[in-house]
Image (tube, rainbow, N blue to C red):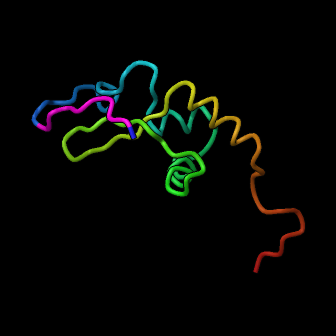
Amino acid sequence: MTLLMEVPSNKPVGNGIQAIVPEGYHTRTEAARLTERDRDTLRRWHKTGTFPATHFVQAGKLKVWLYSDEDIEKLRNIAAEMKIGRPKGAVVA
């Protein structure tokens, strides 16, 4: 994990989280939009190690995981290799 920036908890954060995200990095919400995947999917990939986010910014108690432009391309490749939905012929109880 790489801490990119720590924002003092008493510093007001204008314009939301975007105000503290360094250029060339994206929040999980933006990464989800750019990769056409759900935020929860990216969160699950992080937790399971499929693709752990390795950069973050810290604002008080809030930790915001970030994805670089290079990470976005890697996520797109992972997503392209995965099949969406259930396998053909799967029985749903």
**Height in image: 52 above or below 92?**
above
Residue 79, image x and y in percent? 69, 42
Q: Residue at x 53, y 35 (%)?
A: 31
Q: Residue at x 36, y 22 (%)?
A: 22
Residue 84, image x and y in percent? 75, 52
Q: Is residue 86 left or right of 48 when viewed as pictured?
A: right
Residue pushed farthest bottom?
93
Q: Is residue 40 left or right of 91 when viewed as pictured?
A: left
Residue 77 lies in quadrant: top right
Q: Quadrant of the N terminus?
A: top left
Residue pushed farthest left?
10
Q: Residue at x 62, y 35 (%)?
A: 35
Residue situated in front as seen by the camera: 35 or 49: 49
Q: How many marks?
A: 0
Residue 85, image x and y in percent? 75, 57
Residue 81 lies in quadrant: top right
The verdict on residue 42 being magenta is no
Residue situated in front as seen by the camera: 16 or 63: 63
- Bounds of the magenta span? 2-9
Residue 15, image x and y in percent? 28, 26
Q: Residue at x 60, y 50 (%)?
A: 50
**Height in image: 93 above or below 20?**
below
Q: Quadrant of the C terminus?
A: bottom right
The verdict on residue 5 being magenta is yes
Residue situated in front as seen by the camera: 26 or 56: 56
Please tell me whether the stretch drawn in magenta is mainly helix, strand or loop: strand
